[in-house]
Image (spheres, rainbow, N blue to C red):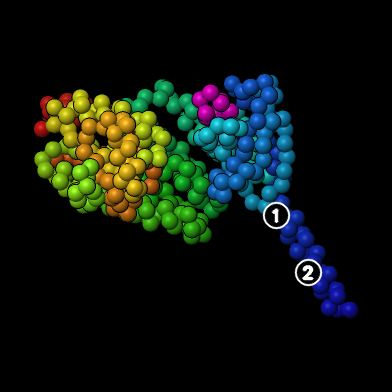
Amino acid sequence: MKQNLLAAMLLMMLAFSTQAQELKWKVMGRVANAEAQDTLMVIDVKTQRLVTTLNVKDGQIEPIEGILTEPAFCAIQREGRTGWIMSFVLEDGTVNLDIDLDNSVLLNTSGTPMNDDLSPLLSYLAHPVGGYDPTKDEEYACHILSHVREIVLRHAGDALGPFIIQMTQTRYTPTETLALISLLSERQQGDLDIQRLKENMTLAAETDEGCLFRELTGVGRDGHPVRLSDFVGRGQYVLADFWASWCGPCKSRMPQVIDLARRYGDRGLQVIGITMKEPVEASERVVEQLDIPFPQIYQSTPMSTYGITAIPAFILFAPDGTILLRRTISPEAVEAKLESLLSTLGNLK
């Protein structure tokens, strides 16, 4: 009898525990530039699985509800399209979304604690103060870092802290990313994804702005071995463009990089391409298709040597091999840095 009573009590406790973990979420909101009848998919960023679909009618999301056992950090994808619109949290309560499909941005998310804290960052990403100016990427990154730091301080002990660091870490330097990670609770720093990121950023911090370049080897277009030191540390400014044949943004930005090489080449800038590890044939095919005129280093290891985790990315080296600029930035931001150097030095030679 006592055993049966104990078993019943344990079952009741388990049922209560399971019930207490249920998060009842609801999504509603508005969608600008949607079709009269449209469908949006909600994707769990971590698992990359479909969580639910949102039916949009006349610019309004038809309210939908569901249950989860833990908060899910989600992106939105339009049915039949590629690319994600980042990012909001499915958690206990009703989240209101404000989406602009033409510009692929989440303008605002609100209604629950985590989403309310995300809102100022999303608003800034969608509408930077003074408007977005690609020549001010470093200033832009400082504002984002400030917003992210506030979120991390408020959510150092829950899942939003690690998520927001991972979501935005390409916006600033490895040293800044490590500083954000140090703000997390011991438990959140133990998250496997954060541990992996910390390892990559620790490596990358060793080649951060102000550090001397680290050797990298690969294969040139002629099939012969080539080293980064064949270009860097030889008395000229060198811009390294990290790319891959499978990277759409890399290829779409390549004409701008080619333009930089042509306009600043006579003034002392050497541009080189460094591909992520992939078959030489794939890299060479893109070089030929886009008529890329500058040297390439194929079959190298930028991830393990420089901690490059996202592309396209650029590193600008000084004549002595010191790293002057390093982050996932735009060609316009690189040009702004070059113009700043030219205004001081007169030329880059």
For the residue marked with disc 1, what is the amino acid? Gln
**In this image, 7 relative to 186: left or right?**
right
Q: Position of residue 70 (x, y in %)?
A: 64, 51
User: What residue is at 40 percent from the left and 25 percent from the top?
Assistant: 132
User: What residue is at 17 percent from the left and 40 percent from the top?
Assistant: 318
Disc 2: which residue: 10
Q: Position of residue 49 (x, y in %)?
A: 60, 46
Q: Nearer the viewer, residue 341 or 105?
A: 105
Disc 1: which residue: 21
- Up/down of 308 relative to 1, above or below: above
Q: Position of residue 312 (x, y in %)?
A: 35, 38
**In this image, 153 relative to 269: left or right?**
right
Q: Position of residue 47 (x, y in %)?
A: 57, 49
User: What residue is at 13 percent from the left and 38 percent from the top?
Assistant: 236
Residue 193 in sight from this viewpoint = yes
For the residue marked with disc 2, what is the amino acid? Leu
Q: Nearer the viewer, residue 175 or 259?
A: 259
Examine the image and state in which quarter residue 27 appears: top right
